[in-house]
Amino acid sequence: MTTPGTGKMTQADHEQPHSKPEGERDYWLDKPSNVDRLVKRFYAVCAVLLAIDFLVPKHSPFRIEHYWGFYGIFGFIACVALVLIAKELRRVLMRSEDYYDR
Amino acid sequence: MIGELSPGLVLVLGAIVVPLVRGHVRAVLMLALPVVAFWQLIALPMGQLGAVRAFDLTLVTLRVDRLSLLFGYVFLIATALCVVYSLHVRDTLQHVAGLIYAGGALGAVFAGDLVSLFICWEIIAIASVFLIWAARTDRSFGAGMRYLIMHVGSGLLLLAGILLHYRHTGSLAFGALDIKSPGGVLILLAFGIKCAFPMLHGWLKDAYPESTVTGTVFLSAFTTKVAVYALARAFAGTEILIPIGAAMTAFPIFYAVIENDLRRVLAYSLNNQLGFMVVGIGIGTELAVNGAVAHAFADILFKGLLFMSMGAVLYRVGTVKGSELGGLYKSMPLTTGFCMVGAASISAFPLFSGFVTKSMVMTAAMEQGHFWVWLILLFASAGVFHHAGIKIPYFAFFAHDSGKRCEEAPRHMLLAMAVSAALCIAIGTFPDLFYKLLPFKTGYRPYSLDHVVAQAQLLFWSALAFTLLMRTGIYPPELKSTNLDVDWLYRSVGRRLVDAFYAFGDQAWTGLARGTTAMASWLAGYANRHHGQDGIFGRSWPTGTMAFWTTVMLGAYLILAYI
């Protein structure tokens, strides 16, 4: 659902269009190509961090920690799970903003 | 040094003078108070001081050791930062309540006996609720009431526990307590309410976000950290705290992800950080307790910093709802920077404070072989980066441009944030200096190659998850909403039960009234039938009736005489 070329989140884009005041200067982050470049560099750092995991001696008593890239993969899965579960929880937990005021 | 005077009392006595002066004089006085109290603190010798005799009890109002000193330092630093941050406030209520609250917290930390602790416990509860009410909204009034009920309840449990403990042991010393002894459970529960244990945590996410811009910063520093101190003092090594703490780290982060009010997100994340401390206290080894109290120290600074940055947004924009913010880095670049330092610290980035404090608890869990606890803490570490480290700065300052433009935060707020940020970085960069303040010497070294790489992997790949979920549109958008939490039990279910009880009482009363009326009208009708205008006794004059009854009586008398 990414809006082509902007590289920004989409759902909010559709609801609330960018509303930069007229005549204001463009900031570096306002340019989608800059954001894309930033994100690509970030991906590269992630890849490097996982790649150098071979070189690091491990001392943990837990075997799982000695697997290659454990922390990176665990962090990724943990966060995806966290967000997806929290999103589902909204079905049960979410009420209108003035729920307690009525 | 001013005799054996508690540094807390310096603040409380100062708070009494504050309403008598105005303007710049008041500002100078309020800035001077934490400085004087700090000077008093560092002049105090180690040991049990400030003995007060009350009835036949000896109370120790000043127990100075490494544990109480550590909390004393950070409470006074926090007080000074809060005072600087709130220099623009022209509200005597908040000035007085804030200082008494901080003084009560200091008093609790230095209390050497349980009675002094109880007195300070109550001062904290009552002074802090005025900071919530200071927002002067209907919501803050309700939230403050609920907060007060919980904290007065905590005080009552503490008092009952102290009395049982005293009867059993004959001692009022505030030292290690046994959870199995009479009173021990009650005292633990009292601490648990203040520490926002799971299911007792409703007040925290309910009340803190309803306070004023500056009130929330005050609140985030003291109440829960006093509870952490009390737990570390009394219940170190109590194993039940390990699962309790682990649950505290994990469940609030789900709420934090979907919460829209960014100060409420921070309240959830405060709850999550308390979990790490509680786990450390539960493990109870020297390294674990060091980790717990060090993390409390660091948390006061970085959580205060995050609340300050969101407070600045609220002050300038008028809202901290994620759904209405975005793009504020253009208007508030310095606040953005400070917020990101706080975010990096809470997420435990290398060179920031959380990295050198939280890892002690993690390592202790590992050394003691608590595999599942360690895994939950790791999950919570990734989660805290997700909701506090990324979500807070991203939705407030970046994300889509909300079009809102405002001034940068006022100078005194920027100063308070700058000093907090500098302290976060100093602790993270020079941990050895900071470790010298901790209660135990453990020789722990946070900066090893595997630790730095592991943490960097964890954080970067968590951020990668966020980026991908954002760019694919899977990430749940910020929505105007309320999410049901444990406070729903008393704000909705409990309220309905009370309403039903009243409705029942109402109906019972109406029924009773109706029944009585019916009976009365039947009686009146009966009387009317015989004594009314057309009744048999109403037709003649009253003398006629009298003559009738006299005849009846005389007749009866005559008959009885013959029997």
Image (tube, rainbow, N blue to C red):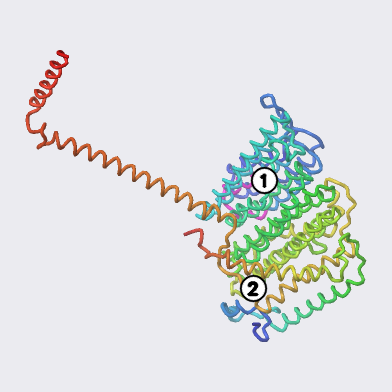
Tell me the distance, in whole angstroms, between the alpha carbons under discs 2 and 1: 35 Å
Pinpoint residue B398: horizontal percent, then vertical percent: 67, 72
Pinpoint residue A8: horizontal percent, then vertical percent: 66, 79
Towards the viewer: B71 or B332: B71
Relative to B554, residue B198 above or below: below
Residue B324 can be seen in this image: no
Q: Quadrant of the N terminus of chain B?
A: top right
Asked whether residue B89 is drawn in magenta, I would say yes
Q: Quadrant of the C terminus of chain B?
A: top left
Relative to B207, residue A2 above or below: below
Pinpoint residue B456: horizontal percent, then vertical percent: 82, 68
Q: Which residue is mark 1?
A: B102
For the stretch drawn in magenta, what is the main secondary structure?
Answer: helix
Find residue B177 and report its image quarter: top right
- Disc 1 is attached to a residue of which chain? B
Dot 1: element: helix
Q: Which residue is mark 2?
A: B327
**Label 2 close to label 1 by CB (< 8 Å):** no
Dot 2: element: loop
Q: Which residues are magenta?
A: B83-102
Question: Earlier along the polypeptide chain: callout 2 or callout 1?
Answer: 1
Name which residue lies at 73% across and 60% down.
B418
